[in-house]
Amino acid sequence: MQNEIKSTLENNQSTCQLPASFSNMDLSEKLLKSVHKLGYTTPTTIQSEAIPAIINQHDVLASAQTGSGKTAAFVVPIIQRLLKDASDSPSPAKHPLRALILAPTRELAQQIYEVFAKLIEYTPLRIATLLGGESMPNQKQLLQKGIDIVIATPGRLYDHVNMNNIQLGKVEILTLDEADRMLDMGFLPEIEKIIAHIPKHRQTLLFSATFSEYITKLTQKYQNAPVIIKTHSANSSNVNVKQSIYLIQEYQRLSTLKRVLHDNQGQCIVFTNSKIDCKKLQQQLDVNYETLAIHGDMTQSQRIESLQAFKENKIRILVATDVAARGLDVAGLPLVVNYHIPYHAEDYIHRIGRTGRAGQTGLAISICSDKEVYNKNAIEKLIGKDIIEIKNIDNIDNINRTDKALPKDNLFGNKNIKYAICGEYINKYTKNKLIPDCALFRIRPKIVHTK
């Protein structure tokens, strides 16, 4: 029979005594030193419940809201378990692969790697990532040195398995992070072939922000009496994120986004539904804002460069496809914008989960045309509540000023050349000329008078 630990963000009661701090978790001194160095003191709900269960070698099926510390909830106990037989020897034979973590995207895998790398700083454990878009020979050479922990995307890992570059026969712990997304992306055949190479006597951990019927089938097939941990109601969105939505006509989409960016001056991630739209929007916004993109057509180095620039606050806007929706942690990100409503309702939860993380508050604004209402309704059904509609959007059709526009109280600059901003266009004027393109943005024609 499955053990079930039930808790909610509103009522933090549990069926067992939960540790009040990391110091009470009986972690090794080396690991605890890294934990404290990162500023971890009091574990989050998911960490309090998952870490003891994993250390005690139970299979775990866990669902937690984004930004709740889910990654550390499996990284910390995996390290603790591996330290028991960790070797200081430089010999590759003393460092067989013992823990395998699969993630649906390169970005999530890289973030998991970064958490592991910080927490194993004072240990002899070795770690590597196997991601698409990077050199296979270099990855093979790294594996030959002996690696205790591998974080990988399913496709690239399966390539190495086929080429006999990696041996999975000594894997003790298998973790599937964002398992539902991997299934959605069609990775199930690769995952099943990979699991076939792993010993049946192992610990299997499944983590995600959402549960689905496919996850239930997966756990029935590959887990043994897992502890089920739900730190929130199934498929709910983060309570720290204020959600609102603009209901617009299609021609208003870009001007609505610019209105949002004008009203909210901090950094933000803007999500689109396709790579083509992502590229196009990045070019449109880059005229007036510091903007980069991240999507599947970019090389891994390009994607890392964009993410790093955004995390270091060198750019204001990151335009992204759903490749960035899972697991990315940008400290203090105040705003997420859904430029398009996602096709899959579950993706909405992960998109808006980029803000409101680690107990902070955030804002998620969606832009929905009449053609996307069906998707909006599906999201509201999934999260169990209506998204607040932003009313009085008539101002969206007014002249749209941006960060690089002239000051609000001075629409015109140089007295010899007159400028006004209309939608995404910058137009020159001479005396008594009508503003062009007014019909496109439904702006009431105005006469520009100059001295």
Image (cartoon, helix red, strand yellow):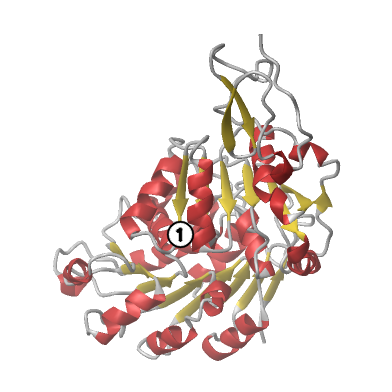
Q: Residue at x 57, y 65 (%)?
A: 50
Quarter of the figure with the C terminus: top right
Question: Which residue is depicted at the point 67% across and 13% down?
Answer: 450
197 and 268: which is toward the camera: 268
- Residue to which mark 1 is pinned: 295
Task: Give the number of marks.
Answer: 1
Position above or below: 168 against 419: below
Left or right placement of residue 23 versus residue 442 in this view:
left
Quarter where residue 109 is shown:
bottom left
Q: Nearer the viewer, residue 30 or 240?
A: 240
- Which residue type carries mark 1? His
Residue 16 left/right relative to 81: right
- Location of residue 17 in the rendering, given as x and y in whole percent from the top left corner: 67, 61
* The N terminus sits in image quarter: bottom right
The image shows residue 405 at horizontal and vertical percentages of: 58, 26
The outermost residue toward the left is 91
Q: Secondary structure at mark 1?
A: loop
